[in-house]
Amino acid sequence: MALGDFLFPHLDLKLVIAHSFEVDIEAKKDKSSKEYQDLAARASFSKSDFQKLGIKEGGSVSIKSKAGQVVVSGFIDERLENGIASVPRGPWALSLVAVPTDGSPPKMHGIEVTATKTDGKVTSLDSLLEGP
């Protein structure tokens, strides 16, 4: 194991983009609010995967897919199985979704991602809206 792997552990996971009533309610109020961004810019992991990443509740985790990369806050969700991460539907999750060129709907679950502990700040909504 390289020193970087020790300092910034990573896991290959399957991502599920989940529907969240809390996120939807805050989005209807004000998508630019801190409350909305705190709820939407998060990822949940099984307790075991969370511990393997070595982050603290609310700590920063980078999630990278073939389509993009975001930094979100990490949390434990005891309902999740090992190997699965969940991000609520919103700009952070959608930044990880590849848009098919054949007109088929985008894949919203089972997306292959790598989660990595990071010291970086959560990706801002403004930077997501700016695009690449």
Image: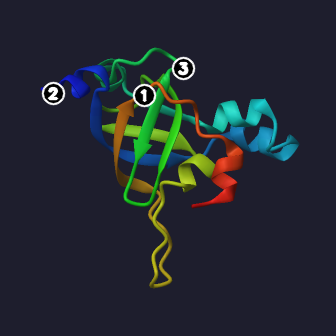
Identify the secondary structure beneath mark 1: loop
Identity of the residue furthest to the top in this view: 56
**Residue 61 appears at what percent x and percent y?**
45, 31
| Residue 25 placement (x, y as % from top left) | 79, 40
As helix, strand or loop, the secondary structure at mark 3 comes to: loop
Residue 58: mark: 3
Q: Amino acid at mark 3?
A: Gly
Quadrant that contains the N terminus: top left
Q: Secondary structure at mark 2?
A: loop
Q: CA distance from mark 2 to mark 3?
A: 26 Å
Q: Residues within 10 Å of mark 1 (few under 14, many from 20)?
A: many
Q: Position of residue 37 (x, y in %)?
A: 70, 36
Q: Residue at x 28, y 35 (%)?
A: 11
3 vs 1, front mark: 1
Q: Amino acid at mark 2?
A: Ala
The residue type indicated by label 1 comes to Thr
Would you identify the image quadrant in which residue 115 lies? top left
**Circle 1 is placed at which residue position?**
118
The residue beneath circle 2 is 2
